[in-house]
Amino acid sequence: MAAAAAADSDPAAAVAAMSTCAHCQREIPSSNIDLHSVHCARNLQKCQHCGEMIPRKLMDEHYDESHAPINCSLCKETIERESWDIHKGEKCPQRMVACEYCEFELPAVDLHEHQDVCGNRTELCQTCRKYIRLREWIGHEIQCHTNSNGSADTSRAIPERELRPPPPVRPARPARPAHASPHKRLLFTIAVTGIAVMIGSILFQRDESF
């Protein structure tokens, strides 16, 4: 009791009462250091990968669960466990990814070729009634249908032909009389007369020849 009281009253004595285990590098009360050191060296082992003290009988299990390389079932490559999350989510060439244009899922290794073709497809813009390539769709909306404030510009989005008012309806003109003008009737009379003279001349020449 007196020693404990002295240690509580003297912080330096409390620090001196702690010892470092040579095996696990933990601070252990000096009164227990011998017993701890024997137990620690016999039952615990330091993991060479993470530095954790692991029970010797569980070291293989710890390695398999925490540090053993993983065989990727998609690309068949062996990946270090520390890099597995990145490989699975970003690096594996056979991971399934969705096309940004049609949302069809396919292996990442084939995505570039697929999107080169898919992005060249066109769709009708319902705002300006133009056919736009899918790869240019976002830029088209930003450039053509957004005003300086960043909001949709409806006046530009509507085609010009739809903004113009329809032409006024003109009243129907009264029908012209069916008779021809005097000038046309004169030309018709001259033409008929000329044909008649020509036919008479031909008949007269035939009579003289007989």
Image (cartoon, rainbow, N blue to C red):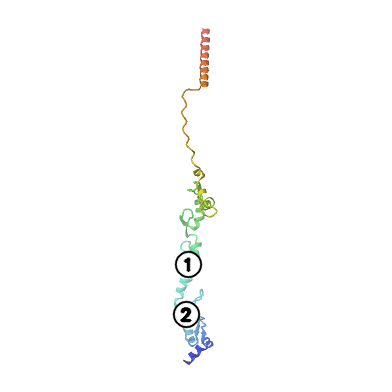
Residue, disc 2: 44
Horizontal and vertical percent for residue 190? Answer: 53, 17
Residue, disc 1: 70
Residue in front for this viewpoint, 177 or 117: 177
Horizontal and vertical percent for residue 188? Answer: 51, 19
The amino acid beneath tag 2 is: Leu
The amino acid beneath tag 1 is: Ile
> Which of pointers 1 and 2 lies earlier in the amino acid sequence?
2
14 to 54, vertically: above or below:
below
Residue at 50% in and 64% down:
87
Q: CA distance from mark 1 to mark 2?
A: 26 Å
Residue in front for this viewpoint, 41 or 183: 183
Element at label 2:
strand
Q: Residue furthest bottom?
A: 2
181 to 120, vertically: above or below:
above
Residue at 47% in and 67% down:
70
Horizontal and vertical percent for residue 55? Answer: 45, 78
